Image (tube, helix red, strand yellow):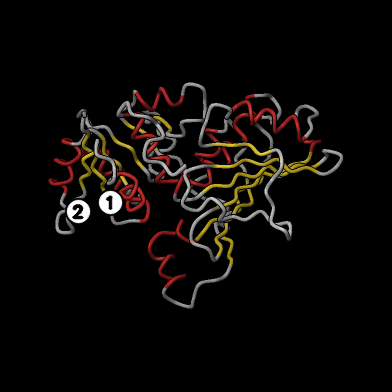
Amino acid sequence: MTQFSVFIDGGAGTTGLQVKDRLLARPELSVMILDDDLRKNDAARKTAMHDADVTILCLPDNAALQAAEMTTGTNARLIDASTAHRVAPNWIYGFAELTEYQAEAIANAARVSNPGCYPTGFLALVRPLVEAGIIAPEMALTIPSVSGYSGGGNALIAAYENTNCALPYGTYGLTLQHKHLPEMTQHAQLTTPPIFMPSVGNFPQGMLVSVPFHAASLQTSVSAAALTDILQQRYASSPLISVAPDAPLTAAGFLAADHLAASDKMELFVFADETSSQFVLTARLDNLGKGAAGAAVQNMNLMLGLNPYEGLNL
């Protein structure tokens, strides 16, 4: 059996720990994580990146930029889970289902930028409709969303789990300049940045990403069934993304945000009023699964020529 070496740079963070959990049980992989006394040692990190078949950067943006600079001009292959390179021209965007040829581009890439959790849900819903000519690139979209508190990293996790100071629900990003906006705009092929309304709830993992709009704002008249059909056709070959014609609501009529916690799948739903004059499209996923670690492992599998879904929680 061919064995591949994978270096996780930043293995102590939430995404790094989730990636490690998905990789350690796989006999074809040798996982490298530097000890605490070396994890900020640039020489040790550079050596590990050069020796590994693939490095997964689970770092803050500035540290990820530094890591990428350290490997410039080398054959090191990187997957960056931070925001730093998601619209960079020399990096391949790591959402394998985004286009027909995205998985192939990832497989052949030296540098792959992992998508954000919110953008993953948004792009899965919107990009096919832009390409189908239903949503115009200049259309003004709004994205009301909620994520589990694990998306905020160790500090927010501690606030919810170890103290009593966390809010049961709170909205943020109220400067309307969230760092996900360039990624959402570029990869959805929009010319008008959407209004992004993220929030966090008192549950660890899971998220809902919604896109509401009026039928009058679309470029052509469509029904909920037609929108569902477009999405179903787009993701028909994906074992990770499903499009449900009927949403599995709770007895009280809720769509649970944490239903896919610990899964690397994503579910898409189309809601409409009786006349199809108003729509709400919703993506449900785990912010640490398909929205982070699951996507990183899928990208790593592609880059190493392995089964794309090996090690994922299906």
Can you tell which mark lies on residue 39? Answer: 2
Q: Nearer the viewer, residue 259 or 135?
A: 259
* Quarter placement of the N terminus: top left
Instruction: Kindly identify the residue that appears in the image at 50 percent across and 30 percent down.
Output: 97
Query: Does residue 2 sit above or below 46 in this rendering?
Result: above
Can residue 74 be seen here? The reply is yes
Tell me which amino acid carries mark 1: Gly
Tell me which amino acid carries mark 2: Arg
Residue under pointer 1 = 10
Picture coordinates of residue 288 (x, y %)? 44, 50
Closer to the N terminus: mark 2 or mark 1? Answer: 1
Instruction: Kindly identify the residue that appears in the image at 69 percent across and 52 percent down.
Output: 249
Picture coordinates of residue 145 (x, y %)? 60, 52
Q: Quadrant of residue 304?
A: top left
Give the Cα distance between marks 2 and 1: 7 Å
146 displayed left or right of 14: right
Instruction: Kindly identify the residue that appears in the image at 17 percent across and 35 percent down.
Output: 50
Instruction: Kindly identify the residue that appears in the image at 51 percent across and 37 percent down.
Output: 240
The mark tally for this picture is 2
The residue lying furthest to the right in this view is: 275
Can residue 175 be seen here? The reply is no
191 displayed left or right of 178: right
Q: Nearer the viewer, residue 185 or 8?
A: 8
For label 1, the crowd category at 10 Å Cα-Cα, with few meaning under 14, some 14 to 19 and many 20 or more, is many
Q: Are marks 2 and 1 in contact (CB under 8 Å)?
A: yes
The residue lying furthest to the bottom in this view is: 164
Q: Nearer the viewer, residue 130 or 151?
A: 151
Query: Does residue 208 sit above or below 92 in this rendering?
Result: below
Picture coordinates of residue 76 (x, y %)? 22, 32
